[in-house]
Image: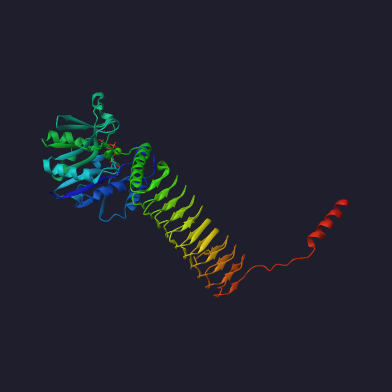
Amino acid sequence: MSTSHVLILAAGKGTRMKSGRPKVLHQVAGAPMIDYVLTTAASLGAATRTVVVGHEADLLRSALAAYPDLRFVLQQPQLGTAHAVMQAEPLFAGVRGTLVLLSGDVPLLSADTLRTLLARHQETGAAATVLTAVVDNPFGYGRVVRDGDEVLRIVEQRDATPGEREIREINSGIYAFDLEPLFPALGQVASDNAQQEYYLPDLVAIYRRAGRRVAAYAVDRPEEILGINTRGELAAMSERVWQARRVALMASGVTLEDPATTYVGKDVVVGADTVIRPGVSLLGRTTVGARAVIHAGVRIVDSELGDDVTVLDHCLVVGARIAEGVAIGPFAHIRPESEICAGARVGNFVELKKTRLGAGSKAGHLAYLGDATIGEKVNIGAGTITCNYDGVNKNRTVIEDGVFIGSDTQLIAPVTIGRGAYVAAGSSITKDVPAGALGIARGRQENKEGWATLKKVQQKAEKKT
Ligand code: UD1
Ligand code: CA
């Protein structure tokens, strides 16, 4: 087999999206559509991978910075798909082999189909092989005009005659090209069409005229090559992908009480016998253990939850670790770099940020715990606030094992509450509290005996006069 190279077209404005952002960065089921294309491309083991960028090129480049060894080519202005490929010519000077061309807006292509396309192309020795599909509604796609097995040309929707519009075999926008004749032939593509653009599919007719063979490979599952041009299509494709994940999750032993409102990202792992109630999103690199219960309206992103965890209604958990058996919520907000250890409890309206809540510790109600290290068996009273920010720096609060923090306490960081200490309710703690001590920092109460009774007598007397 000859060497293969992948080129992905992603420079177009995506006019029909009516968006300021590159189309390929719009999300399909929780991930940018181009991520799907890049993942499939990677499976091919090609020698190089290159993306043609143009519209909002810098935004796209930086969004793809995490992909190693990705090359970029700039297409400015964007004059059509053939013009886009031509911009890559300098990169392929003197390079031989196969160029696999992918479209950034066709995300569902499978690795299997791509491998088969490449294998067929290399077997037949055609100058180009077009991936096609026979669909019920070909509207908007380029139509494949054939004479038996021979592909004669591809005609765009806007340029097709009424007869050609009846053709149901469409161009996927995915091709394998022999590199050798490709760039010279691209030079012959003209822009005398409805959009005044240089159309890559015009290569088919150009190759035919030059006596070169063009093959077509029709996919079995047309849904793989659906392209996204509008927000309606984006939503429809997202739904298709979400639905496939729901089905897979249920098949793996997870209960979805309302599958239609459950949204699960592609890298999410959920253990068997976990129950997911309505309106739940599990996204990013999230793992949920077995036998967990995720109640309604919860969103969990990039987090690790152990077995038997309960997340009560309307919690948001991002970048956190929750040990097995822990219950949180309702209405808890667990922010990045937080860890809730075994046997701990986080109740309603509690926010954690960069905070470790030790084993068996409890923050039951209405608290903000930020930049805090909290030991084991600590009780955090209702309304406790770690004042971690002094306007310039974030400071840490350390609460050692067995501490009791009374309700409505402010812990003004940096501050340490020693092992087993008590902090009296309503305190503003500015100094460390030693182990075993009571810290109390609040106005002292004074009772004025008879004051209220006397006041009422005076008020009645004033009314009479
Ligand atoms: C294209 C094909 C059509 C095919 C369909 C499949 C052409 C002329 N038509 O139509 O036959 O059925 O895909 O989905 O190729 N792009 C650039 N630079 C440009 C223009 C486009 O990089 O100057 C990129 C886009 O970002 C996109 C891809 O090429 O990723 C396809 O462009 P798009 O305008 O969506 O082509 P379609 O009209 O869908
Ligand atoms: Ca398209």
Q: Residue furthest top?
A: 163
Q: Position of residue 9 (x, y in %)?
A: 27, 44
Q: 205 or 148, which lies in front?
A: 148
Instruction: Indicate the position of residue 139 as horizontal and vertical percent values.
Output: 30, 30
Number of marks in the rendered image? 0
Residue at image location 52% in from the left, 62% down from the top? 362
The answer to whether residue 73 is seen in the rendering is no
Residue sitting at the far right:
465
Lateral position of residue 224 relative to residue 20, left or right: left
Q: Which sits in the foreground, 254 or 417?
A: 254
Question: Residue 303 falls in which quadrant of the image?
Answer: bottom left
Considering depth in this image, is 161 or 198 the residue closer to the camera? 161
Q: Residue at x 16, y 40 (%)?
A: 128
Nearer to me, 9 or 273: 273
Residue 294, image x, y percentages? 44, 51
Residue 411, position as x, y percentages in the image: 56, 66
- For the rendered model, the colour scheme is rainbow
Report whether residue 442 is seen: yes
Q: Is residue 28 left or right of residue 393?
A: left
Quadrant of the picture in which ligand 2 is shown: top left
Give the quadrant of residue 16: top left
Look at the picture and state if 456 lies above or below 217. below
